[in-house]
Structure formats: structure tokens, C-alpha cells
Image (tube, rainbow, N blue to C red):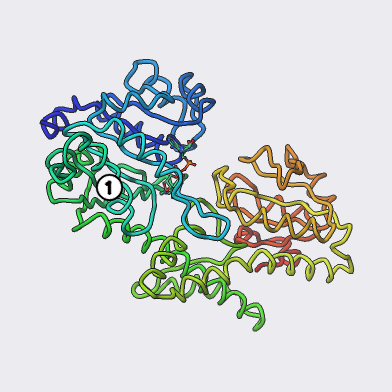
């Protein structure tokens, strides 16, 4: 019955958690013709969404508003609606606790709600990034316990009474080439039939699916992908530190190495890792590995190197100012770019925040400009945004520090007006005039 409802797109779908992952997913499901209900605990967000206002860059108001207006997408804070839904995707955050261990409180809270409203033939899919075992160790027992209330838990059968799968979200916010629908979807169900039902669902709005043998495998796939990035960025950051000592240009070296058509994939150094995924997800893997008496050394080492990069950037600024016979204490800096990567406004875990903390400690004065981040408060301090980016502003700075290489900035213009530039992203690679003012990491 569920399969027929999915194939005829008459199934009623729901998405829990309407952030960077959940909102684009809600829209993709709705565009395939399903009626979708988005559920979030943040009532302000729900009020904005009801007015057709999106706070996720990958979903424009032009796309969202008509879907809300027509009722194709409904949004609510009321979990009671779960009882009416045939499919439920869970897209809640999976951060770290202060001691860098997985914080499962959002998944647990969402699953408790799902369990209370679980009904026959319902398909539940977890999309949040998490450690291998989460779906079967945390979610399945909770669902089993509620489903079998009043009967014996032994009589409940996942894969027959309800369906459960893990399918990691691989979206990269701001990537204009690969979106949710043209990125293959990994799916691992608790039973083969769970996998089949989940795959049938995704096939309605995702071009390509790839099934794996279990939820644990699917959970591990996502952690491999993000750990791969973290470790390779750690390696290239280390190479950048070595090149600096050897007075070699790491950017030129990477570009040259990338001409090799096989066996090499370019990664680039920078001021450190950022975003909700790469700095966090590897810790989910190393934490779980410890339970198998395994110490994940590559992960720890990459984390150590990557998290030292903000300090290295500040050392570069000190070095650059020193060449001008200026101390950092009292220098006027212009920080360009706060977002953790270019062309988006996401500052979660952004290395720019750590660079700013270090600069504040050293008593430098600074302003920042980021076309996508207009407000910033850090450790209860308001940090002043400067808008627009004027020639005066650039000229008056003792040093311009490029922390995010947003495409909308004219770097030739910037270098022309700047006294000194520390470029942590090779944003000035095409600048011909004024190269002598630029210091790169
Ligand atoms: N952002 C990315 O680029 C990305 C990419 C792939 C995977 N992921 C993973 O997807 C998951 C979600 O990430 P995100 O970036 O969308 O997070 P987000 O913070 O942008 O959004 C999460 C949303 O969930 C809501 N929420 C929290 N607890 C809830 C609950 N109990 N019930 C209902 N709503 C709840 C929050 O209010 C928020 O709106 C994480 O596990 C993340 O690692 C993120």
C-alpha cells in the first residue's frame, strides 16, 4: 500500500527540521507532486516560512512562496501531524558537545515524537549525519517500543509493520552544479524491504539512487566522505606550512600537481575548517571507533593541523605588518569575508571567528566586510560590519585580510587600493598589478 501511494505520489510526506538540509528536501519532495508538511521546533522560522520567506540560500522565496501559498507545502511546530503522514525524513542537527563527543539530543527528541505517532506502513528515514549504528541502536528500539505498546515487542517487525532507513544528505550549500536532485542518494534500510520502500520514495525526486546493505553502512559512507575531506585538507594545510618555511608557493604547486589526470585530486589550504559538517563529522567516527578500541590517528592529526590554521593566519598578519614596521597592537585591519566558504552567508564553525578572537586578544582594531553576513556578535560582543566596501575603507586599513574568497569582490580593485593584503584563499591569483603588496598563506 505504501509503495502504491509513493508511486502515485499520493503519499503524504513530512520533514522534521527545516534548515540547510530539511528545507531544500521539503521543496524537492513537493516539486515531485507530494503534499509535504515541514515540522520545526523554531516557531519564528515557521512564521517566516508561512509567509514564504526562506532563510536557506539554496531555496529562494520565488520557489518557496508559491508552494506555501498553494498548500503543497505546509509548515508547523505541531508534531501531532506526524500521525497523518506516510513518510517522514528527519533532518535535525548533529553537533558536538563541549567535550567533542556526539550530541544526540536533537535526534533523540525528534525520534521520540516520531515514535509517539508511528503507525502501520509509515516510512521513517534519518538523514542527519551520525555515527554508524545510530539508526539501529537509537531509533529502532524507540520505534519498536511504541509500535508494540499493549502487545509484545517481539511481534513488531520492522520491514513489515513500518519501514526504517538511513540516507545521508550530501548537499553542498551554494553548489550551483550539484544539487540534491542530481547528486546520487545513498540508501540503507534496516531490512531489504525497508531499503526498497525508501529507494522507491527517493526515486520520485532524485535522479540516481545507490543502495547499500545496511543503515550502518550508509552512516559510514557519509562519515568517510567528510573525513576524507578533513584529512586531505589537513594534509594540504601541512604542506602549506612546509612550503612557507621553504619559501615555495603552495598554490602554484597544487595547480601544477592538478594537471596530472589520474591519482591526484587538488585540495587547498586555508584559514581552517568551517561549516556544520567537515569540522564535526570526523569526531563522530573517532568517537565510535574508540568503542572498538581503535584510536583514529589520521582524524586527530588532521583536526590538530586544521585547528592551528587561524593562529598561523594571525602570525602571517603579524609578519606582514612587521615588514611595514607596524605592530599588530593598534593596527587597523579590514577583514574580508566571515562566512566559512565563498558565496554563502553561513558562519557556523567559521575559522574567521577564531581569527577575529585572536586578533581581538592582540588588541588590533578591525572592521569586517562580508556581502553575505551583515550581523555578527562574537562572545557577546557586536562586531562592526562595514557596508559598502569603499576605496576609503580599503585605503585606510593597515592590512586587508582575505578570509573568504567571495566571487562578488573585485580583487584587482581591492589590491589597487590596499596598502597590504594577507590572502588566505588565493583570491588574488589573477591580480597582475600590486603583487608586491600581497602575502599569501
Ligand atoms: N548543512 C549542510 O551542508 C549539511 C550537508 C549534509 C548533511 N548535513 C547534516 O544534516 C543535518 C542537519 O543539518 P542542517 O545544516 O540542515 O542544520 P540546521 O541547523 O540548518 O537545521 C536544523 C533544523 O532542525 C530544527 N530542529 C532542531 N531540533 C528539532 C526537533 N527536535 N524537531 C524539529 N526540528 C528541530 C532546527 O530548529 C533547525 O531549523 C545535520 O546532521 C548535518 O550534519 C548538513
Percent across and percent down for residue 372 are 61, 40
Residue in the foreground of this view, choosing between 87 and 70 = 87
- State the residue position of label 1: 141
- Location of ligand 1 given as a quarter of the image: top left
Up/down of 437 relative to 25, above or below: below
| Residue 221 position (above or below residue 138) | below
Q: Look at the numbered disc 1 and say if its residue's Cβ is closer than 8 Å to ligand 1.
A: no
Looking at the rendering, which quadrant does residue 321 occupy?
A: bottom right
**37 sits left or right of 84 in the view:** right
Rendering coords of residue 164 (x, y %): 23, 44
Disc 1 residue crowd, few under 14, some 14–19, many 20+, Cα 10 Å: some
| Residue at 12%, 43% in the rendered image | 155
Could you say which quadrant of the image residue 176 lies in?
top left
Rendered-image quadrant of the C terminus: bottom right
Label total for image: 1
- Percent x, y of residue 256: 48, 74
Amino acid at each position: 500500500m505504501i509503495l502504491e501511494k509513493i508511486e502515485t505520489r499520493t503519499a503524504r510526506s513530512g520533514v522534521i527540521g527545516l534548515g540547510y538540509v530539511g528545507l531544500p528536501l521539503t521543496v524537492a519532495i513537493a516539486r515531485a507532486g507530494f503534499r509535504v508538511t515541514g515540522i520545526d521546533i523554531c516557531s519564528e522560522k515557521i512564521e517566516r516560512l508561512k509567509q514564504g520567506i526562506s532563510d536557506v540560500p539554496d531555496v529562494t522565496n520565488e520557489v518557496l512562496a508559491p508552494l506555501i501559498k498553494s498548500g503543497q507545502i505546509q509548515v508547523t511546530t505541531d508534531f501531532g501531524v506526524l500521525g497523518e503522514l506516510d513518510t517522514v525524513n528527519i533532518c535535525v542537527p548533529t553537533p558536538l558537545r563541549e567535550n567533542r563527543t556526539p550530541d544526540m539530543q536533537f535526534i533523540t527528541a525528534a525520534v521520540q515524537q516520531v515514535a509517539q505517532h508511528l503507525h502501520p506502513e509509515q516510512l521513517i528515514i534519518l538523514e542527519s549525519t551520525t555515527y554508524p549504528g545510530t539508526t539501529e541502536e537509537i531509533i529502532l528500539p524507540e520505534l519498536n517500543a511504541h509500535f508494540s505498546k499493549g502487545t509484545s515487542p517481539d511481534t513488531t517487525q520492522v520491514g513489515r509493520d513500518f519501514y526504517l532507513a538511513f540516507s545521508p544528505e550530501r548537499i553542498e550549500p551554494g553548489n550551483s552544479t550539484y544539487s540534491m536532485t542530481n547528486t546520487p542518494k545513498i540508501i540503507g534500510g534496516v531490512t531489504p524491504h525497508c531499503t526498497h520502500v525508501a529507494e522507491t520514495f527517493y526515486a520520485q525526486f532524485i535522479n540516481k539512487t545507490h543502495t547499500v546493505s545496511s543503515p550502518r553502512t550508509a552512516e559510514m559512507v557519509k562519515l568517510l566522505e567528510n573525513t576524507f575531506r578533513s584529512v586531505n585538507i589537513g594534509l594540504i594545510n601541512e604542506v602549506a606550512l612546509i612550503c612557507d618555511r621553504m619559501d615555495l608557493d603552495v598554490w602554484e604547486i597544487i595547480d601544477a600537481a592538478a594537471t596530472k589526470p589520474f591519482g591526484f585530486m587538488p585540495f587547498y589550504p586555508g584559514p581552517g575548517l568551517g561549516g556544520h559538517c567537515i569540522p564535526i563529522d570526523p569526531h563522530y567516527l573517532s568517537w565510535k571507533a574508540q568503542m572498538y578500541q581503535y584510536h583514529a590517528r589520521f582524524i586527530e592529526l588532521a583536526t590538530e593541523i586544521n585547528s592551528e590554521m587561524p593562529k598561523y593566519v594571525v602570525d602571517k598578519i603579524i609578519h606582514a605588518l612587521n615588514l611595514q614596521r607596524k605592530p599588530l597592537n593598534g593596527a587597523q585591519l579590514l577583514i574580508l569575508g566571515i562566512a566559512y566558504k565563498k558565496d554563502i552567508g553561513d558562519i557556523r564553525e567559521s575559522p574567521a571567528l577564531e581569527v577575529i578572537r585572536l586578533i581581538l586578544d592582540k588588541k588590533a582594531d578591525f572592521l569586517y566586510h562580508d556581502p553575505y553576513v551583515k550581523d555578527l556578535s562574537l562572545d557577546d560582543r557586536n562586531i562592526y560590519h562595514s557596508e559598502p566596501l569603499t576605496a576609503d575603507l580599503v585605503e585606510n586599513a593597515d592590512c586587508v585580510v582575505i578570509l573568504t574568497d567571495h566571487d562578488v569582490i573585485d580583487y584587482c580593485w581591492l589590491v589597487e587600493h590596499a596598502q597590504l593584503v594577507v590572502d588566505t584563499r588565493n583570491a588574488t591569483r589573477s591580480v597582475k598589478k600590486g603583487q608586491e603588496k600581497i602575502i599569501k598563506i
